[in-house]
Amino acid sequence: MADVILADGKLTPRASVSQVTLDWACGTDENDFELTIDDALAPNISQGWYFWLDGSDVGGRIVDRRVSVAGGMSTTTWIGQSWTGMLAAKILQPDANQDYLTVSGKLPDILKNLLKRIGLDTVFTVDSSDASILSNWMFQNPRYVDAYTGLRTLLASCGRRLDFKASGNKILLGIVPVQTITNTIDSDLVDFKAETNRRAVNHLIGLGSQELKNRLVVNYFADATGVVSQTQTLVGADEVCATYDYSNADLSTLQSETKKHLQELQTGGSVEVTLSDEVGDGLRVDDKIVAADQSSGVNVTAVVTKRIVKIDSGILTSTFEVGLPVQSANANYSGSSSSGGSTGGGVSLTAGRGLSISGGTINAEVASEDLDSVRQTAESANRTASGFAAQIGKAN
């Protein structure tokens, strides 16, 4: 059984329950959860409470509820934001009379200041000894960005990612190097299927504000290795051209967004692989997977974009989505003042054995013979939960 800690609005643990159904997600989209509790030990909870699986990144804040009545029986489903969803609900914006929000200093100090800026320093505790230093780093594209996207972008510039962990009555926010799983995936070790993509757009024409002959136009090019610049190297039959319509953009915005969008289109290809349980269980959003075949020299990199955790009938399952933004079939793209986009397949991988692949999704079902590790986690959670007993009793 996977035990869930329920805590009040001050992050004070009130109960540990096991009879739950959970659908939780974090990553490029969703960043929310649905939690149904059918446990006699559950207290009367309400909006503003928290839940978490101790020692993991799974948890969040309850915001809404859904009540369903069928056959005279009432079921309440609590709906809320995962930790990443709480960050995504905040906006990082420039100070008054400033063009950009600019930060400097050690990464842990920057995160502490930004959390205080958006009012979440009472929820998250920065727990990192990372010594990386940034100088005059600016949130530029976009200038107004949700805090989750902004922090991911900032940390990515240093090869780092966010790391959430619930410990006791604290939600720790760590900074760790991006994990790149490589040299593990090889045709000599596992079976995999890879497909290169030389059909990707390599010449993108950005169309900005104004009309007809006065319209702003910029050109960006990708070379054979996917490097983007304003110098064209692929011409004639090798050129793959498309337009990027951003009708309200000024020149500076049009240049940066056209370049950024063309970079996103350089996917390199797709890959399907099977990873061991040990490797798959350690993946988090923004980690990378590299697949390589010695005989053909094919090398493809995939990025974890979403992590989904479900609990049903006491069984915990994990799903990962990996890849880059989906390319449009008509090779014409548009932009707007609020950046966004869809994500998904291009790459899929399976964490574990005897599991299934569906599109760009890993389905990591836990079979009965695999429950030893889950049972150990549950026993550890039970010990942690029992440690809360005095505190919970005092709070009640």
Image: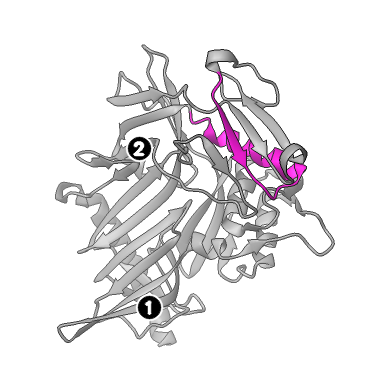
Q: Which residues are magenta?
A: 239-267
Q: Which mark is residue 199?
A: none
Indicate whether residue 265 is drawn in magenta: yes
Q: Residue at x 43, y 80 (%)?
A: 391
Colour pattern: one colour
Q: Residue 64's spot in the image, x, y percent?
A: 42, 77
Q: Outermost residue toward the top? A: 295
**SS class of the residue under badge 2?**
strand
Please say if the residues under marks 2 and 1 sit with CB atoms less than 8 Å apart.
Answer: no
Mark closer to the chain start, 2 or 1: 1
Nearest the eye: 125 or 339: 339
Q: Residue 346's spot in the image, x, y percent?
A: 40, 35
Up the image or down, 230 lies above or below 353; here it is: above
**SS class of the residue under badge 1?**
strand
Q: Which residue is mark 1?
A: 65
Indicate whether residue 185 is drawn in magenta: no
Up the image or down, 31 lies above or below 229; here it is: below
Q: CA distance from mark 2 to mark 1?
A: 33 Å
Q: Residue 243's spot in the image, x, y percent?
A: 59, 35
Figure quadrant of residue 219: top right
Q: Which residue is mark 2?
A: 348
Nearest the eye: 269 or 78: 269
Figure quadrant of residue 111: bottom right
The residue type indicated by label 2 comes to Ser
The residue type indicated by label 1 comes to Arg
